[in-house]
Image (tube, helix red, strand yellow):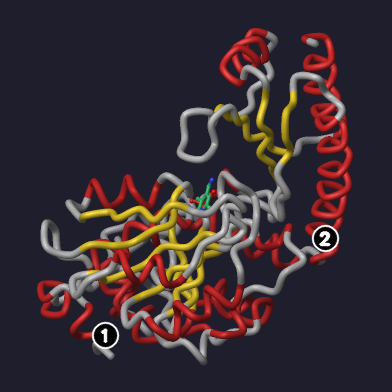
Amino acid sequence: MRTLDELTRPNILRLKPYSSARDEYKGKQASVFLDANENPYNHPYNRYPDPLQTELKARLAEVKGVSPECIFLGNGSDEAIDLVYRAFCEPRVDNVVAIEPTYGMYEVCADMNGVDYRKVRLDDAYDFRADDMLRAADGRTKAMFLCSPNNPTGNSLRREEIETLLCRFDGLVIVDEAYIDFSSRPSLLGELAAYPRLIVLQTFSKAWGCAGIRLGMAFAAPDIIRIFNKIKYPYNVNLLTQREALDMLRRSAADVEQWVSILLAERGRVMDAFRALPCCREVFPTDANFFLARMTDADGIYAALVSQGIIVRNRSHVALCDGCLRVTIGTPEENDALLDALRKMD
Ligand code: PMP
């Protein structure tokens, strides 16, 4: 088993992180803040936000059933994806292994960071085998990316295979659970203590309806979280986002549950309607708030929908998704607009 020090880039291990004014101030009694070159006027926006989002993490820890030291918060989960590379992958030396097709930012961040990105194709059921991932790895593989439920395919990956990979790979395993709230399968969050190299990503952007505030979560063992905190920008989660997220968490979870149950019911209805469309060849099973559909002429249908102001995601040129559109579930009215437009095309 490689140690976390061995997995970490040497310059990051040696790094003396920036210490912000708010980092150094730990007292609770102070009332005169002349330490951060802020403007004393224009409360509350004049003050820098809490760099470690202490209050928000405390509340999230309760909701998620993990300890606050196991939580990293970022400007979307995209920030955590980028930090994996910046912290652990030496440019032009290290590599990562990821399933294909999957969420595009894993590869974009690899390219931005000069890290070799190795793709392992999913099988016909859009599932993966731990063995195939391990075969693609070598001594310079620092991390493996899984996404479950996967984007753009929608399905969850087989749990036993994920756990096999966690047992057999001695680097980091990132499991992106951006869509987990739409799935009936349990999250891997409960397994954090069992797997010291597991990083679970979740986000406020999907079921929580907060894509606009940019708040992503990474859950992992405290030694991994400490490395993320060491290299993140000092005030990476702004004041408005921290406040809004706390408000969301104060609102009853029933709101989110209600949105999810409406979206799941609509998902069933829209998928059934797609199965009945002559222009639809196949609808793939999904655990997310979207589904993949293979169409008779994906490019033509996509363009015709765009011309009517209805935008779906054309995935027809993505590996294993030829001829496929990815459809996000909207409100009943939005879904009807899509279905009406498609029915008129047939
Ligand atoms: N992971 C997956 C699988 C996604 O599909 C997305 C967004 N489409 C993200 C992460 C990014 O989420 P965030 O808004 O938290 O950056």
Q: Which mark is residue 156?
A: none
* Residue 186 in picture, x, y percent from top left: 70, 74
Tell me the quarter of the picture where residue 96 sits: bottom left
Quadrant of the frame with the N terminus: bottom left
308 and 292: which is toward the camera:
292
In the figure, is residue 12 to the left or right of 280? left
Q: Position of residue 74 (x, y in %)?
A: 44, 61
Indicate the amino acid at tag 2.
Answer: Glu
Residue at numbered disc 1: 4
Q: Position of residue 130 (x, y in %)?
A: 45, 71
The residue indicated by pointer 2 is 257
Amino acid carrying mark 1 in the image: Leu
Residue for point 47% across, 49% down: 42
Q: Residue at x 45, y 77 (%)?
A: 165
Q: Nearer the viewer, mark 2 or mark 1?
A: 1
Of the numbered discs 2 and 1, the one sitting upstream in the chain is: 1
Report helix, strand or loop for mark 1.
helix
Query: Residue shown at 16%/79% (left/top)?
Result: 13
